[in-house]
Image (spheres, rainbow, N blue to C red):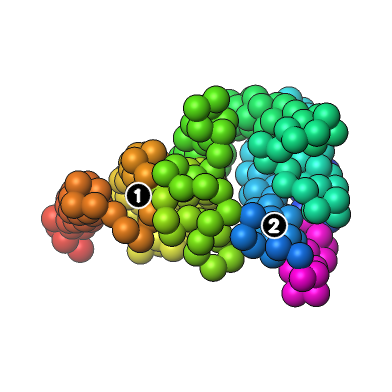
Amino acid sequence: MTNVLRWHRPLTIFAAAMAVLALVAAIGALADPRVLTGAPIWLKPFKFAVSFVLYTLTLAWMLSLLERRSRVAERAATVLVAVSLAEMVVIVTQVIRGQTSHYNETTPLNAALWQVMSTSIMVLFVAHLVFGIVVLRRRIADRVSAHAVRWGLGLFLLGTLVAVPMVQPDQYAHTVGAPDGGPGLPVLGWSTTGGDLRIGHFVGMHALQALPLLALLLGNRHDQLTRIRLLTVGGIAYGILTVLLTWQALRGLPLLQPDALTLAAWAALAAATATATTLVVTRRRPALELAA
């Protein structure tokens, strides 16, 4: 508990604030009858708040792994908090006003607020890039955790990059082949009638938690080198999955309605991942048996 209390203060305070906002937004989703783009109006701030809790706590944990403090990484983390706060202020403000926050340029005020959001996203990307470069260059005592952190940081950037098509002039929406706000999956809201670019974006960004979680699940079941190799297999497969989900969305296909080509790509990824995992695990077995 003492170590947690020493984590980067702006990140942990912001995470706590977002946890409170998530609770408020959850109550709002139940109590406020308003619907916006086909979903309860408070659902978006709820999802963003939960995502920011995970994001900022993960970054704070990563900073705690460094053998020596990095003021550059800590300052980049503080910038991340500032721009994330700006983004959440816009989202909540627009909910209170009964307006959409993304792509809304219907009035000068809405356009200005959307500009604040889009600028915040760009600054967040750059600050995360600086944070990632610094952390990648610093020594982390546990080599397995170090590899998990590196994969998570890199794939997070991939997750932000696959969102670029959403803000292109010929797209400027989450959904491909159907209007935003149509039928969607419960809670997540991902379109069930067209491709949804938020899926690859979501999956890629949450590699930040998924790869460290994989390292945790591996525990001490294998030697250190095998665990690192398994993380490499997992990281490559996760990155390809992020790209495949984005490719599927760009072709206007809903997540749960893939065509034959998409199914073949998923099957190839699953087979390659299973084969690589088996090879990594069995490669060390003869040496271990001789040692025994």
Marks 1 and 2 sit apart, C-alpha to C-alpha, by 23 Å
Tell whether 261 sits left or right of 141: left
Q: Which residue is mark 1?
A: 253
Task: Name the residue nearer the viewer: 286 or 54.
Answer: 54
Task: Name the residue nearer the viewer: 78 or 70.
Answer: 78
> Type of residue at label 2?
Leu
Q: Residue at x 50, y 27 (%)?
A: 170
Tell whether 186 sits left or right of 107: left
Mark 1–mark 2 contact, CB under 8 Å? no
Vertical relation: 187 (above or below) 260: below
Q: Where's residue 290, x and y in %?
A: 15, 57
Q: Furthest residue to the bottom? A: 30
Q: Residue at x 42, y 56 (%)?
A: 193
Magenta stretch prevailing secondary structure: helix
Q: Is residue 200 visible?
A: no
Q: Residue at x 55, y 25 (%)?
A: 169
The label on residue 140 is none
> Type of residue at label 1?
Leu
For marks 1 and 2, the one nearer the N-term is: 2
Q: Which residue is mark 2?
A: 36
Q: Quadrant of the N terminus?
A: bottom right
Is residue 22 rendered magenta in the image? yes
When asked about the image quadrant of residue 74, the answer is top right
Which element carries disc 1, helix, strand or loop?
A: loop
When asked about the image quadrant of residue 251, the answer is top left
Using a 10 Å C-alpha cutoff, classify the residue at mark 1 as few (fewer than 14 neighbours), some (14 to 19) or many (20 or more).
many
Vertical relation: 212 (above or below) 251: below
Q: Where's residue 173, x and y in %?
A: 55, 39
Q: Residue at x 81, y 42 (%)?
A: 90
The stretch in magenta equals 18-33
Which element carries disc 2, helix, strand or loop?
A: strand
